[in-house]
Image: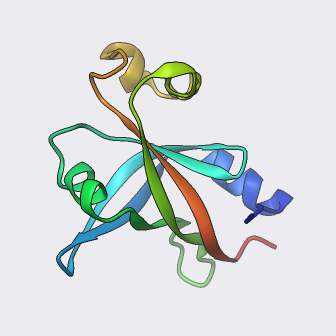
Amino acid sequence: MIEFNQNEINFLDSLEEARIATSHRDIPHVKPVSFVRVENEIIVATDYYTRTYANIKFNQNVGIVIDIYKSGGHKAICIQGKAKVIEDGEEFKKNYNIFYKKFQWVRKDPWKENEAPFLKIIPRTKISWGLD
């Protein structure tokens, strides 16, 4: 199991946006997403009618990068892993509550189980830089 060190945890917990990469039939798709870290996994909010969701249904391999670009001081974590769709149940409720507390946009436009899923990214590899 991949574990984040304390510097990585602090960095991940301080940010709200990442870029997720998915693919289907060898066509890559990258887009910005909101995320939270839950233990050693990354949770991403999505919708059923997105290219990202459609891609995950065919190919669970994902890449996600969380970074701050500053010339000469770039900080980032790049993760590769598998995505699992979370649509309902206790795990959905737990993730939803974390998103609700962290993001104003969730509080303004709430949703329920089976209305929009989360993607749980289970890291298989990771690399980080600039976080010393």
Q: On the picture, is 54 further left or further right than 117?
A: left
Which residue is rendered at x = 30% and y = 57% of the image?
Answer: 56
* Residue toward you, 102 or 36: 36
Q: On the picture, is 45 further left or further right than 92?
A: left
x and y percent of residue 4 in the render? 76, 61
Which residue is rendered at x = 70% and y = 76% of the image?
Answer: 130
Identify whether 36 is placed above or below 127: above
Q: What count of labels does the image hold?
A: 0
Which residue is rendered at x = 41% and y = 68% of the image?
Answer: 61
x and y percent of residue 105 in the render? 36, 25
Q: Quadrant of residue 27?
A: bottom left
Identify whether 26 is placed above or below 36: below
Q: Quadrant of the C terminus?
A: bottom right
The coloring applied to the image is: rainbow
- Asked if residue 93 can be seen in this view, the reply is no
Q: Quadrant of residue 47?
A: top left
x and y percent of residue 22 in the render? 31, 66
Q: Quadrant of the N terminus?
A: bottom right
* Residue toward you, 75 or 29: 29
* Residue toward you, 75 or 71: 75
Identify whether 91 is placed above or below 18: above
Q: Residue furthest bottom?
A: 72
Which residue is rendered at x = 50% and y = 20% of the image?
Answer: 89
x and y percent of residue 72 in the render? 60, 84
* Residue toward you, 110 or 84: 84
Q: On the picture, is 44 further left or further right than 50?
A: right
- Asked if residue 7 can be seen in this view, the reply is yes
Q: Quadrant of residue 87?
A: top left
Q: On the picture, is 114 further left or further right than 123?
A: left
